[in-house]
Every structure is written in C-alpha cells, then in structure tokens.
Image (tube, rainbow, N blue to C red):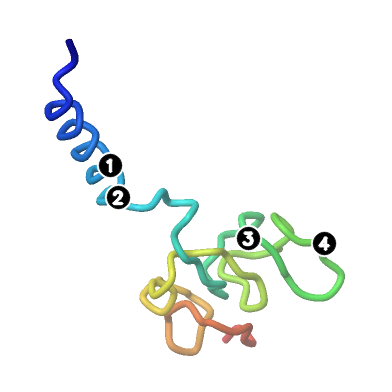
Amino acid sequence: MIDRRALSLALAATVAGALAAPAPAAAQEKEHCYGVALKGQNDCKAGPGTSCAGSSKVDYQGDAWKAVPKGSCTQMESKTSPTGRGQLAAFKAK
C-alpha cells in the first residue's frame, strides 16, 4: 500500500526544489555590450559592410556587441572605450 502522506511530502519537496533552482544561463536576461568582444567573436553588428556574428575585424571593436548577463557590461574591460569599460551603445574607438 502506498503511503499517501509520504508521497505528498516527496512531491511537495520536489516541486519546491524545482521552483527554488536558479534559471538556466540561457534564460537569464542579457544585454548588448559594445567594445568587449575579441576579433571574430562578436554576437552581431560590427559596422558597415559586415554580416553579423563573428564579423568583427579587431579586438574591442566599438561598434560590435556581445550578449552578456544584464548589469555586467559596464564592469567589463574594453581597451578602446572612452571609459575603459564596455558600453551599452556603439562608440567610436579611442
């Protein structure tokens, strides 16, 4: 005979664990961060005449972005940015 109380407790613990688990990385909010991608490693947009992903011509290109976790962009290094950090909009490299 199945102990319904034990089954209910086990089911409740499983559901509670699933609800408390962190969201997978793919589901986390992202933002476009300009000036942080290395040559050929941008996610999209790399200036006039380029196709998209992987088309940046130089490291830290100011008009090429990489998708990064929301809130982390302006903390990332950018050797071409006026502030030395990633930017939330395209910029002219220094």
Of the residues shown, which amino acid type is indicated by label 1?
Val
What residue is pinned by disc 3? 42
Front-most of 74 and 11? 11
Q: CA distance from mark 4 to mark 3?
A: 11 Å
Q: Position of residue 93 (x, y in %)?
A: 60, 83
What residue is pinned by disc 4? 51
Label 2 SS: helix
What residue is pinned by disc 2? 19
What residue is pinned by disc 1? 15
Residue 18's quadrant in the figure? Answer: top left
Residue in the image at 19% along x and 33% along y: 8
Q: CA distance from mark 1 to mark 2?
A: 6 Å
Of the residues shown, which amino acid type is indicated by label 2?
Leu
Residue in the image at 43% along x and 51% along y: 25
Q: CA distance from mark 4 to mark 2?
A: 40 Å
Residue in the image at 43% along x and 88% along y: 83
Of the residues shown, which amino acid type is indicated by label 4?
Ser
Q: Report the mark closest to the observer, 1 or 4.
A: 1
